[in-house]
Amino acid sequence: MGRAWIVSVTMLFWMSALVCGCSGGKAASSYGAPAQSDVDLALGKPYTVQDPWLDPQWVQSETSHPDTNGTKLTDGVYGTATVANFVGYLRDDYRNIDVDLGDIQTIHSASAGFLQDVQAGIYFPETVTFYLSSDGTNWAKIRTVPTAIPLDTTSSNGSSSIYQTFSLSGLNYAARYIRIHLQTHVWLFCDEVRVMGLTTVAATVPFPTVTPPVSTPALGFPKAGPLTGGASQQALIYNGYTANDTSTWTVADFKPYVTYVDTSGNSQSMLFDSFLFLPEGTAPSGDSFGASGTPSNQADWQYYIDNTFDPANQLTALNAAVANAHTALHNDLIPAVVIAIPYPSPSQTQFSAGVNFNQNQVGNSTAQQNRFNAIKWYIDTVIQNWNTAGYTNLNLIGFYWYDENIEYGLSTIEIPLIQQVAAYIHSQGYKFYWIPDYQGQGFQIWQQLGFDIANMQPNYYTAPSSVPAQRLAVAAAISKQYGMGIEIEMDDNILNMTPGGSSYRMKVQSYFSYGSTEGYKGTFCNWYQGIKTLENASQSTNAPVRAIYDSSEQWMMPTSQ
């Protein structure tokens, strides 16, 4: 699974200043000069920035692009000369920038400037929404201005950086405060907020009508039900190619996942009730199933299908392990199965003979259709193999989108493609699942994309030691707000009887304790565990390591069979 990352930005760049008005972008040179008596009402004025989640890792990372003395956004200095003039905001969903103009004044226009450098993970906001207020509490929504430049756009002169001003003109309102609402993807770089108007207010200038606040109650964590195939605890099973063949799963490998086993290896109760099969990184060719590296092709995808339906291992072994559990425990639980869809990389120019995914070469429409057709072939082939195999102890309930972010920086057709895939999966009677990175791109719109269930990776397990366990509370709060579940995370580092191994085991226990306090215990959770970490823990003679396996079972007890 992809882990959280921090983008460091070192670059020399030029800016082609584009201005986005309400009707689209225009060249900076054509930016209309304000009326002679208008002044920049925001110049030198104080402001506050609201971060809804305050993730400690992101807050620390933002110190590399700080808002020195809290004045950069209204100091009149634009970022076209140096990146140092930009303030960087990292993830955490969105920001509200509220500028206090000091008194009720007449506002004629407003604007904010932003940098985009896709290679560095810096993106324009998709939209900028402007609000006005007379008291800083009751706000009037004025307008939302969309980006005029797609989020995968880089400069045309060889530099990776471009600049855009989102502007709103033609206003005539009385207000003291202005709010600029921005949604973040990875990094968002803003250099200046400008508000043009008069310091006086004529009797004929109206106050804008206050927009009633919209209540957005938390959607809650997903629970076992029709969307999960009745399951509540899903083990991630990485299979496919690895140099040392660790991702081949036998009946014995599956036993401590299908059932909880004691220290003698005897089954005591049913354990995981769902299994997600997904490829381990690359195919034997070295091609990647994900968004980075050399893109995989049809032969690679066929390899993964063949591996997953191996007549002796993988799904076949899981089916046999469940049959053994039925006999041993007199239980007839049928686990749910979900199978991953490799990412159809837009950099792939020859998926198969004459099939090109690159929209720059074949156009958006053809690229999207080629990518969809490849996925449709894959889904149809998986279903055909499943029906042929006749697994009597397993229930195929859906498919999983393998990429852990919506790749705005790679393609402008990611959203319509995923929606098209979702519609096809649903038409075949299956569900569609996703596990984005912690605050991964697009997580806020997972339902709009067509997913039935989305669980977020907290990425606390692999975070630097400086990141406190509070990360789990933040991840839980975000997930609960958006109706997402939580992924439990561990790997073979917990097996080490060293101080380092102990710290990893403590991290795993934090997932359990926060699950109880934050409310995701007893809900639908995914379990990332390296390749076979829980199996190894179940067989360990070291009590602290075995305790992780036991604690996992105990934490799942409300939904164990």
Image: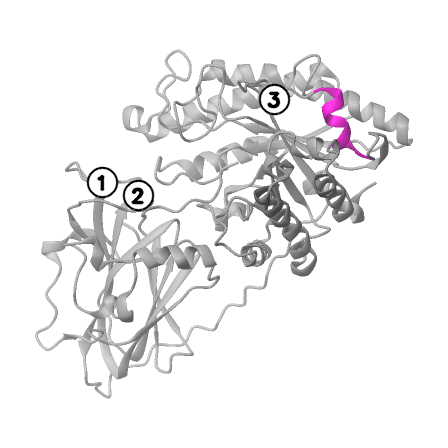
Q: For residue 431, which numbered disc appears in the image?
A: none
Residue where numbered disc 3 is placed: 246
At mark 2, the secondary structure is: helix
Classified by dominant secondary structure, the portion drawn in magenta counts as helix
Q: Earlier in the sequence, mark 3 or mark 2?
A: 2
> Whole-percent x and y of residue 185?
39, 49
Mark 1 or 3, nearer chain start: 1
**Which of these two is toward me, 296 or 408?**
296
Q: Residue furthest front?
A: 498
Is residue 309 among the parts visible in the rendering?
yes
Q: Is residue 333 above or below residue 49?
A: above
Count numbered badges in the picture.
Answer: 3
Cα–Cα gap, marks 1 and 3: 40 Å
Dot 1 crowding, Cα within 10 Å, few <14, some 14–19, many 20+: some
As for residue 257 lying within the magenta part, the answer is yes
The residue to which callout 1 is attached is 160
Q: Which residues are magenta?
A: 250-261
Mark 1 residue type: Ser
Q: In the rendered structure, which disc, 2 or 1, sits on the residue that comes first in sequence?
A: 2
Q: Give the quarter of the image for residue 280.
A: top right
Q: Quadrant of the C terminus?
A: top right
Discs 1, 3 touching: Cβ within 8 Å: no
| Residue at 80%, 42% in the rendered image | 560
Q: Residue furthest bottom?
A: 203
Dot label at residue 120: 2
Residue at 34% from the left image edge and 77% from the top image edge: 208
The kind of residue tagged 2 is: Ala
